[in-house]
Image (cartoon, coloured by chain):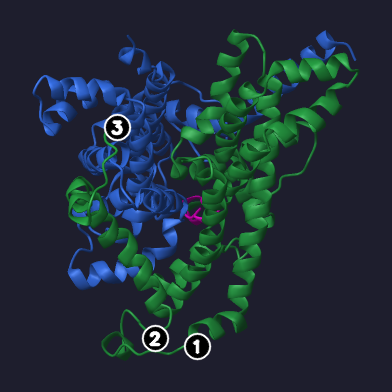
Amino acid sequence: MSNTRVNRLHYIVLAFMALTFLTPLVWIVVASLDPNASDALKAPLSVTIGNYVSVLTNADNLKAYGVGFAISFVESLLVVVLSCLAAYPLSRYRLSYKKAFMNIILFMTALPMIAVIVPVYKMYLSLGMLDSLWGVILYLSAASLPYGIWLMKNFMDAVPAELEEAAWVDGATTMTSIRKVVLPLMFPGICTVFIYTFSKSWGNFFVPFILLSSADKLPASVKLYQFFGQYGLIDYGPLAAYSIIYTLPSVLLYVLSQNYMSKGFSLSGAAKG
Amino acid sequence: MFTKQKYGIVEELKKSVLLLPAVIVLLCFFIVPIILTIYYSFTNLALSGSNAQNLQFVGLSNYKRMLTDPTTITSIKNTLIFLVGSLAGQTILGFLIAYFMKQKARVFRSVVGPCFLIGWVMPEIVVALCFMAFFKENGTLNAILGIVGVRNISWLYEHPMISVIIANIWHGTAFSMLNFQSALDNVSGDIEEAARVDGANRVQVLWKIIIPCIKDTIATNIMLNTLSTLGVYGLIYAMTGGGPANKTTTLPIYMYNQGLKGMQLGFGTAIGMLILFVGVICSILYTRILGTKEK
């Protein structure tokens, strides 16, 4: 086969695959706009944004989005601060345990944390931390910290040490040089860690599902599950609208992260001359 | 690295102060739970009843029970089927998409790419909802199949495992695609060109040049997918709840049913140990592959 014909074939196959990948989304989009949506796929008789309005004017729903946002935001902040602090000695100092430490961190990034959820439940029960948002936040932070530290150390490695030495010569202390030199240069890296942690946490279902029980503490993910898992008679239109609103932040964060990642880290030029 | 002078232990501890907060959080909420998992799996710990008060060491009896319990065997089998099905689908599809997308027009890539990415970006509970509607008797799939004259099938009852595997492949393919895209971008065009000049055809270039060049990526990708597939819980739980008749009960679901719903923490934790064990092996392999590159 000639090159152009193979190329054309690729285009056709890819377009077909892309369409196939979109088919599971058809129902949710159509249903969210249909005032009389059911679980069956059907063309709506009229189109409305009423489902979105009813979801967004319901105080319980807004609360669930808010709780989800609070958990993800505090967790991401915690992970960013802790991993920034940890990354500094790992990136800048000669430490005898560094290689072992980084290997353990890498090892921890990969462990399936669901395996330990039963003992965590028991531990929280004994400590009185069940059904507490802080409990969820701390557990989620610990689960995302290894990857945060790993990323942050690599980002910090990319900031040339010479820039910091220059700051020292000018009389800055270690903390000042971190604050005024290293952190601003690492800003894209910090955003990457924050966004990554946030979107994983936003989509997480099993941790809040298992560790929380009060209806008013449930984040959007668990609320959505209860929406279609528990009740026999479901309002499909609002359910679909709720899901789409819940998905939007994930999409938005992904687009944002692409922006930051493509900027890259080419700071080594700053130390030239 | 700032200095070449040798530090004493005191000096080294001083330098490590900034590590402390992270290490404390990791100790309390990561390491301790793992130690508890190992410990509880050898006990008769229960959430209620007399065993909740007097915790006893029961040796290997949780593990013995696991080996003779037919549902455990079923969940191990289900986990393997789910794992192999998802891995094969995600890796092959992800690679093919990345390979076909290479050097295609920019406009085309930016239109087609997001179609695959949306499934990956979407929270798993929404994925579950989409596929419940997709596989329903009056759902999208049957509507499409109806056009070519296939009778209505209630996928979630008749083929529950295939349904959850397809949902998981849809959810995970883009991750493999992204990995393979960046790996393929790093394959030098010169080697490919040289092979073509020497008369190799497309398939030969793919097998003899491209695949060997990206074998590290293939290995890490399979490792990471194994680890994430092993932890899939919400997707299956929301779609089928592990049913019908345990047909989609994988280890995480069984662990939840026994350990928390059934309140047998000891036995549930032993099931968790199984997941952890497979996870540890994969993590070690993964660390080996990546760790060698770190100085």
Residue under the image location 63 percent in, 49 percent down = B165
Q: Nearer the viewer, residue B232 or A225?
A: B232
Query: Secondary structure beneath disc 3?
Result: helix
- Quarter assignment of residue B43: bottom left
Circle 2: is it few (<14), some (14-19), or many (20+) Cα within 10 Å? many
Give yes or no for contact between labels 3 and 1 (Cβ–Cβ under 8 Å): no
Number of dots carrying numbers: 3
Horizontal relation, residue B268 to residue A222: left or right: right
Query: Which kind of residue does numbered mark 3 sit on?
Result: Ser
User: Can I make out residue A66 in this image?
Assistant: no
Tell me which amino acid carries mark 2. Asn
Q: Circle 3 sits on which residue? A: A54
* Residue A83 found in image quarter: top left
Checking the image for residue B44, the label placed there is 2
Chain in blue, by letter, is A
Image quadrant of residue A87? Answer: top left
In the rendered structure, which segment of residues is drawn in magenta? B228-237
Q: CA distance from mark 3 to mark 1?
A: 53 Å
Which amino acid does the dot numbered 1 rest on? Answer: Ser
Is residue A19 toward the left or the right of residue B132 in the image? right
Real-space CA distance between mark 2 and mark 1, rounded to the nearest whole angstrom? 9 Å
Q: Earlier in the sequence, mark 2 or mark 1?
A: 2
Q: Are marks 2 and 1 in contact (CB under 8 Å)?
A: yes
Label 3: few (<14), some (14–19) or many (≥20) C-alpha neighbours in 10 Å: some
Q: What residue does disc 1 label? A: B61
Q: Residue at x 30, y 71 (%)?
A: A122
